[in-house]
Amino acid sequence: MTDENKLVPRENGNAVVEVVSQAQRFPSIDLSPREPHLYDYLLILRKHQWLILSFLLAVVTIVSIATFRMQPVYVTAARIEIDRENSNYLPFQGADPYDSVTDLDNYIETQSRILTSETLALQTIRNSGLIPHAELLGGAGGSEAITSGNLANHKRPSELGAFLGSLSVKRVGQSRLLDVSFESTDPQLAAEI
C-alpha cells in the first residue's frame, strides 16, 4: 500500500473498508496571501506593547524636560517709516516716475542694510550701555572694538555677532515701512535696545 491510501475502519464496527485520500485526512492550508485586517494590526501592537510604551514614555520625558528648561524669548518690535531725502533742488520735475519707484526700492533696501550694519550695531552696543550684559558679551569683558567704537584694526567681537543675530529688519510689503525687532531672554534688555 502506498502512503496515500490507507485502510481506515468504520465506527459502527462493520468490516467495510474505506479508502481515504491524503487530501481528506489533512486539512488544507491556504498559503495564498490575504489582505491584512485590523485585527492583524492589533495583534502586532499587542505583541510589541511594552516596546511602544517605553518609547512613548522616553519621548514624553525628554520633551517635558526640554520644555521646562527653555527660557522664554522676549521680542520687541518697532515699525519705522523711511522717507526719501529730497534730492530735487530744482523747481521743475525732470525725473521719470518709473525711475523714482525703482530708486525708492533701492533706497529702502539701502536703509535696511544700514540698520543691520556692524558699525551701527557697534555704536548701539557702546552708546546704550549694553556692555555690562553678559548675554551679549559671552561672559567676558568688553572688547577693544567696543571700547574704541571702531572696527578698524580690531578683530570682530563676539558681542557684535550675538547682537546682529538677535536683530531683524524686514520690509512691510511694498511700502516704505520697516519692522525692526530684537529678541532676548531678558525683557529689560529687549526693551532697551
Image: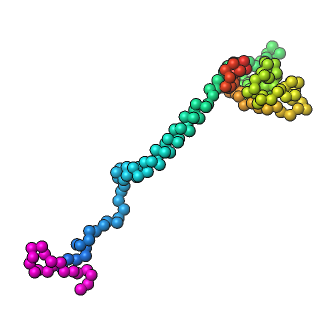
Question: Colour scheme used in the picture?
Answer: rainbow
Can residue 114 be seen at all in this image of the molecule?
A: no
- Residue furthest right in the image: 153
Q: Nearer the viewer, residue 186 or 35?
A: 186
Q: Nearer the viewer, residue 134 or 106?
A: 134
Residue drawn 86% across the image and 24% down it? 147
Say left or right for 33 vs 52. left
Q: Is residue 65 above or below residue 186?
A: below
Q: Nearer the viewer, residue 182 or 57?
A: 57
Q: Is residue 59 above or below residue 42?
A: above
Can residue 29 be seen at all in this image of the molecule?
A: yes
Residue drawn 72% across the image and 18% down it? 192
Corner quadrant of residue 17: bottom left
- Residue furthest top in the image: 91
Membership of 62 in magenta stretch: no
Q: Please provide percent x and percent y for residue 4.
A: 25, 80
Image mark count = 0
Q: Please provide percent x and percent y for residue 139.
A: 77, 29
Residue drawn 79% across the image and 23% down it? 131
Q: Nearer the viewer, residue 167 or 154?
A: 154
Q: Please provide percent x and percent y for residue 66.
A: 59, 35
- Image quarter (top left, top right, bottom left or bottom right) of the N terminus: bottom left
Membership of 17 in magenta stretch: yes
- The residue range painted magenta reads 1-18
Q: Please provide percent x and percent y for residue 135.
A: 73, 27
Residue drawn 81% across the image and 25% down it? 122
Dominant SS of magenta comes to loop
- Image quarter (top left, top right, bottom left or bottom right) of the C terminus: top right
Corner quadrant of residue 94: top right
